[in-house]
Each structure stands twice: as C-alpha cells, then as structure tokens.
Image (cartoon, helix red, strand yellow):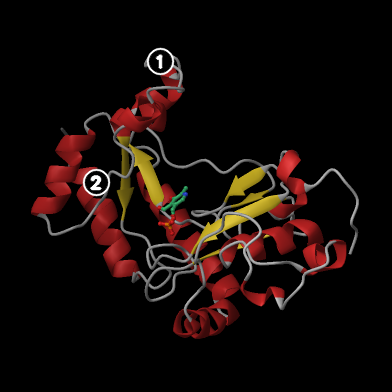
Amino acid sequence: MTTASPSWSSRCALISDNAQGFGCTLNGKATTDWADIATTSFFPAKPLGCYGDGGAVVTNDDRLAELVESLRVYGKVTPTDAAERNFHHDPKYLSLRVGMNSRLDTIQAAVLLEKLKIFADEIQLREKVAARYSAGLKDHVRRVPHIIEGGQSVWAQYVIEHDNRDGLQAHLSSQGIPSMVYYPVPIHMQDFAAEWAPPAGSLPVTEAASQYVIALPMHPYLPEADQDRVIEAVRAFNG
Ligand SMILES: Cc1ncc(COP(=O)(O)O)c(C=O)c1O
C-alpha cells in the first residue's frame, strides 16, 4: 500500500456510473479498465438485483478502495491513516472525514452471492430476448437499440424509440403489457440541475430521444410467447 501524495482528497477521479451496466464490457474489458471507480446499483430492477436496496463501488486502486471503505463507515480511520498518524487511543470509532452509513445488508449480500453465480448466464439470456425483439421490431419502430462494435450490453432495459411513444404506451397498457418511460425529462432540464446544467436546447439528441423512448418488458426468463405478444402488440399499433 502506497502513501504517496497527493492524497485523494485533492485529486480528481473518473467515476463510471454502472447502475444500469454492471457486467457490460467493451472489447472484453469492464469499465474499471478506464475509470478509476465504477459504481453500481443492486436495486431489484437492475441486471444484478438484490431483494431490497444495495449497491457497490468497484476499483482497482487500493488507495481509493480504502478511502471508499472509510466513507462507507462514517469516515473511519483507514490502515493508511493509522500508519501516518499517532492516535492516543483506539481509533476504531474515530471519523477522520465526513462519511455515511452505507453498509450492504448481510441478507442482501447473501442473495447477491448466489445470483452472481448465474449472472453471466443471465446476461446471455437477456441478449437472446433483445435479439428477438430487435429482429421483430427493427422495421416497425423509429429505432431499436444499437450496440457499438465490441460492446456487450447487459440489457438492463430494452428501449425502443417510437414516433408516437405515448400512444404506443397506452396501446400496450390496453393489452395488459407493461412498459416504462424512464427518462421523460433529460437530466440537464430537471429543476435540481438548473444552476449548472446547459440550457434546454443544448443537447438536441438527448432532448429528442426523451420524446420517443419507451422500455419494453425485459428479464432473462421472459418466455418466447410473451416476447412474441409484445412484438405483435407493438407492430399492430399504427398510431
Ligand atoms: C444510471 C443510474 N445511476 C444511479 C442510479 C441509482 O441507483 P440506486 O437507486 O441504487 O441508488 C440509477 C437507478 O436507477 C441509475 O439508473
């Protein structure tokens, strides 16, 4: 373990938000190949979901791992802190930085350990669902998902674009088929971001996509008959 400066508190780190993409790769490499840290979510709707709330931070950097572990437990003293300073009493309950309580429940960890064993298989099953959707829908909607060359998606969602997205959603709903519009308002146009985000109109691709996107049912065990029902319902909508 190195104690070289500058300390992480004075450096920038590149963070990859992998909440929807834990397990995705580009040319066989995970995002931790180019980012200092990858964060992910184990919320049940995510590709690797637990049975409640959970998440993880992944890094190949020992110093960052130490720091994140400290932040996870109220800014506790790390082994590096302990090596660099003399504490007059047991530093176990000392906080050296502002942290939080962000422990993963043991029960959630137990669920995740089991699900991790089949995670790679589940990605392949999702891939098959996505391929069937794309084959059935590519000529009938504005756009089906496109994966860049060398990329492996984990298909957290299967999102199409449709010219009459709201009409399609109502049509699917009338057929008992659930769908979701996850991001109707782009982040830079949400109130919380007003102070620092670029103004509306500055991200035309994002802004256009937010009008058209709709996520179709997607999970590794979606039966082919259900996939066909979704495909037929989308194709039958002429709105
Ligand atoms: C891209 C992205 N980042 C972060 C999050 C937040 O994850 P959590 O709710 O587990 O904190 C989500 C959840 O949907 C997400 O999609």
Residue 61 appears in the rendering: no
Q: Residue furthest front?
A: 88
Which residue occupies 57% across, 59% down?
22
In front here: 41 or 237? Answer: 41
Q: Amino acid at mark 2?
A: Val
Q: Residue 233 location in percent, x, y?
A: 20, 51
Residue 102 appears in the rendering: yes
In whole angstroms, how far apart are the C-alphas of marks 1 and 2?
34 Å
The residue to which callout 1 is attached is 199
Q: Amino acid at mark 1?
A: Pro
Q: How many marks?
A: 2
**Neighbours of disc 2 within 10 Å: few (<14), some (14-19), many (20+):** many
Q: Residue 37 location in percent, x, y?
A: 68, 52
In front here: 3 or 108? Answer: 3
Horizontally, residue 229 falls left or right of residue 5, namely left
- Asked if residue 160 is positioned above or below residue 153 in the image, the reply reads above
Question: Which of the marked residues, 1 or 2, is nearer the chain's N terminus?
Answer: 1
Residue 94 occupies which quadrant of the picture?
bottom right
**Neighbours of disc 1 within 10 Å: few (<14), some (14-19), many (20+):** few
- Asked if residue 66 is positioned above or below residue 17 in the image, the reply reads below
Which residue occupies 39% across, 14% down?
201
Q: Residue 88 location in percent, x, y?
A: 76, 72
Task: Nearest to the eye among marks 1 and 2: give it.
Answer: 1
Helix, strand or loop status at disc 2: helix
- Asked if residue 71 is positioned above or below residue 222 in the image, the reply reads above
What is the number of the mark on residue 234?
2
- Asked if residue 80 is positioned above or below residue 182 in the image, the reply reads below
